[in-house]
């Protein structure tokens, strides 16, 4: 599943200002609500519920908050590069500065998991992460995320 199927240019946030995990999730929920025409509170509550199960901060400055919503008709992705790293209660204890939000239909099942795995693989690539951290240009960020990953570390 190519990420350009779920991530559009308007869903790239090149410099998200947030001072806490809660504020970051609120900002992302608000932007996702605009783009998906879904209820902002429902998105925020879904993300918050998932975070209560365990942080989606996967390490190396990366978080992948995600959740399933009723009546959602397709997978939706949003990428944000944080203005300043924040505590996300990540598994490695490091602050987070790269966030990929994924929303899925309730019945997405395997597609949701495949998308999560693809996002995690891509963002864990040190070359990709370095490129994402080196630009604030939304078009460049979109190309890095949706193009064929070319790792400088390989």
Image (spheres, rainbow, N blue to C red):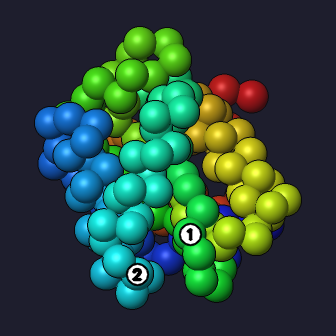
The x and y percentages for residue 25 are 31, 50
Foreground of the two, 47 or 135: 47
Residue 153, quarter of picture:
top right
The x and y percentages for residue 135 are 33, 49
Q: Is residue 100 visible?
A: no
Q: What residue sits 35% from the left and 28% below the top?
A: 88
Tag 1's secondary structure? strand
Q: Quadrant of the N terminus?
A: bottom right
- Residue for badge 2: 38
Crowd rating for badge 1 (residues with CA inside 10 Å; few <14, some 14–19, many 20+):
some
How many dots with numbers?
2
Tag 2's secondary structure? loop
Foreground of the two, 67 or 45: 45
Q: What residue sits 64% from the left and 34% below the top?
A: 125
Residue 105, quarter of picture:
bottom right
Rendered position, 114 above or below 8: above
The x and y percentages for residue 53 are 54, 33
- Residue for badge 1: 69
Crowd rating for badge 2 (residues with CA inside 10 Å; few <14, some 14–19, many 20+):
some
Find out whether the residues at labels 1 and 2 contact each other: C-beta distance under 8 Å.
Answer: yes
Rendered position, 81 above or below 106: above
Rendered position, 5 above or below 54: below
Q: What residue sits 65% from the left and 41% below the top?
A: 120
Q: Earlier in the sequence, mark 1 or mark 2?
A: 2
Q: Quadrant of the C terminus?
A: top right
């Amino acid at each position: 599943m190519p990420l350009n199927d779920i991530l559009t240019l308007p869903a790239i946030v090149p410099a998200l200002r947030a001072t806490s995990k809660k504020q970051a999730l609120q900002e992302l929920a608000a932007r996702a609500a605009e783009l998906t025409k879904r209820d902002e509170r429902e998105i925020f509550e879904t993300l918050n519920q998932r975070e209560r199960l365990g942080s989606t901060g996967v390490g190396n400055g990366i978080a992948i908050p995600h959740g399933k919503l009723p009546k959602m008709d397709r997978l939706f992705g949003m990428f944000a590069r944080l203005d300043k790293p924040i505590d996300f209660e990540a598994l490695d204890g490091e602050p987070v500065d790269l966030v990929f939000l994924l929303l899925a239909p309730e019945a997405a099942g395997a597609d949701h998991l495949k998308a999560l795995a693809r996002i995690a693989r891509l963002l864990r690539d040190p070359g990709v992460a370095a490129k994402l951290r080196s630009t604030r240009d939304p078009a460049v960020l979109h190309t890095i995320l949706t193009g064929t990953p070319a790792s400088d570390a390989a």
